[in-house]
Image: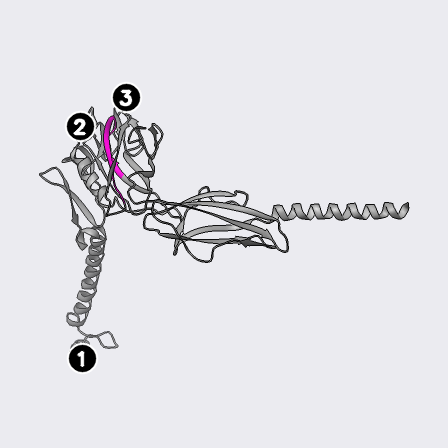
Amino acid sequence: MTSLSSFAFRVVRIWTSWLVWSAVAIVQCQLESLHLRFNSKPVDLAPVFQPSTFVYSATLDWAMDAFSVDAVAHPGCEADKVPFRAISVPKGETYQITIFAKAQNSTVTQAYAIRVKRLDGTETELKTLRILGAQLSPEFNGGLREYTATMVVALEFVNVAYVLLDAGQKVHITAAAQTGSGGNVSRRLQMLGEQLQAGAQTARVTGEVQDFERTQLFPIDQGHSRRLTVSIESADPMSPRDGTYIVTVLREGCTAARPLFDPVSRSCVVNCGAGFYENSESSRCSRCNANCAVCAGLLRCELCRQDTPHLSYIIQQDGSCLGVQSTLLGKYYWWCISLGIFAAGLLCMLIGVLCQFICTCCCCPERDRYGFDTDSEAEIESERLLG
C-alpha cells in the first residue's frame, strides 16, 4: 500500500511538472521582434509590435510590389513558418500570412497573423490631417473632405500637419486671403507667407518608419479666418486622380479692453512695449524698423537705438535709422583724448629739460676748480690784489 501511494505521488509530481513546463513554454515562446520591409524600406505594422499582440495589419505603397518578414523569437524558442523570400502582392490586393513562435523540441506554438494590403495607386486620401494647436471638427476621417478648426489667440501661424496614405502621393496646400475685422490680407502676411511656403515641402522624420509627418505654415492675424485647400494627386501616374480637403481655420481675437496682440508675450495688451508700435490694420504690436528704438510706424522712427563702439545710428529723412560704421577715432575717442593729453604733457617736460640743458652748456662759462670761470678772470683778480 505504501509503495502504491509512493508511485501515485511520483506520477502526480511528474504530471504537475509537465503542466508547469508547458505553461512556461506557452508564456515564454513569443516573438522578440517582428518587422516588415520592402527591400531596405520599413513597412509599418498596426498596431506597433508587442510580443503579447498576435494580430497585425500592414499597408504597402503602390510602388511596393512585395514585402519581406524579419522575425526573431525569445531565447530558447524559434520562429517558424517565416518566409525566406519576398512575397509579391498585386496592386489593390491583400495577402494573409501567419508565422509562429515555437518552443524547441516541443509542439507548443504561438501564432502571429499579419494581413498585408497593397494600395492600387489611385487613392487621394490622407492617412492623417491635423492643425497643430487646434481641434478639427468633425474629427478627421479620410473620407470626409471639409473641416473647421479654431485656434487660440496666442498662435500666430496655422500649422498644417499631415501624413500621406501613399508615399508616392503629391500634396499642394494653398491658403486663401484671410477675412475678418481687418479686411484684406496685409502685405506683412503676404510676404511672410511667401517665405514660409519656400520651405513647405521640407519633411520632419519622426522615426525610422514607413510614414512620417509633414508640416506647412500659414500666417494668420488675430480675429481672422483663412480657408485652406489641401490638394492630393494620386501615386500612379498612369491612373491620375485628384482629391481635395477644405479646412476653414479661425483664430480667436483680442477683446475691446485689450485690443492689441503682443507677439513677445503672445497675449493681448493695451500698450505696446519698446521697439514696437500699434498697428491698427492688424490690431497687433508690430516691430519697429531696423535699428529703431521708438517709433510711431514702420517708417516713422522717433529715436534710434543707442550707439555702440562699432556703430552710430542716425535718423534718415525717410524715417528709418541708418547704422554707420564708427571710425577708429570715433571708436576710441576718449582713449585718444587721454593719450593726447598725456603725450602733450610729456612733450612739454622734455622740451623744458632740453632747454635747461642747452642753457647750461651754452650760456654759462665753465668755472675752474677755484671757483673762477676762466684763466683771464683769475689774472685780473691777482693784478688787483697786487696793485
Q: Are marks 2 and 1 in contact (CB under 8 Å)?
A: no
Q: Is residue 75 left or right of residue 64?
A: right
Quadrant containing the N terminus in the rendered view? top right
* Disc marking residue 375: 1
Q: Count how many numbered circles sit on residues in the image.
A: 3
Give the x, y percent position of residue 38: 39, 53
Name the N-terminal-most of marks 2 and 1: 2
Q: Which residues are magenta?
A: 217-234
Q: Residue at x 19, y 56 (%)?
A: 340
Give the residue at mark 3.
Answer: 255
Q: Name the image quarter holding residue 247.
A: top left
Give the farthest residue toward the left.
317
Give the x, y percent position of residue 42: 40, 51
Q: Is residue 93 left or right of residue 243?
A: right
Q: Is residue 351 left or right of residue 73?
A: left
Give the x, y percent position of residue 339: 22, 56
Query: At label 3, which amino acid type do we have?
Result: Thr
Q: Name the image quarter holding residue 175.
A: top left
Q: Is residue 224 magenta?
A: yes
The answer to whether residue 345 is above or below residue 382 is above
* Disc marking residue 183: none
Name the N-terminal-most of marks 2 and 3: 3
Query: At label 1, which amino acid type do we have?
Result: Asp
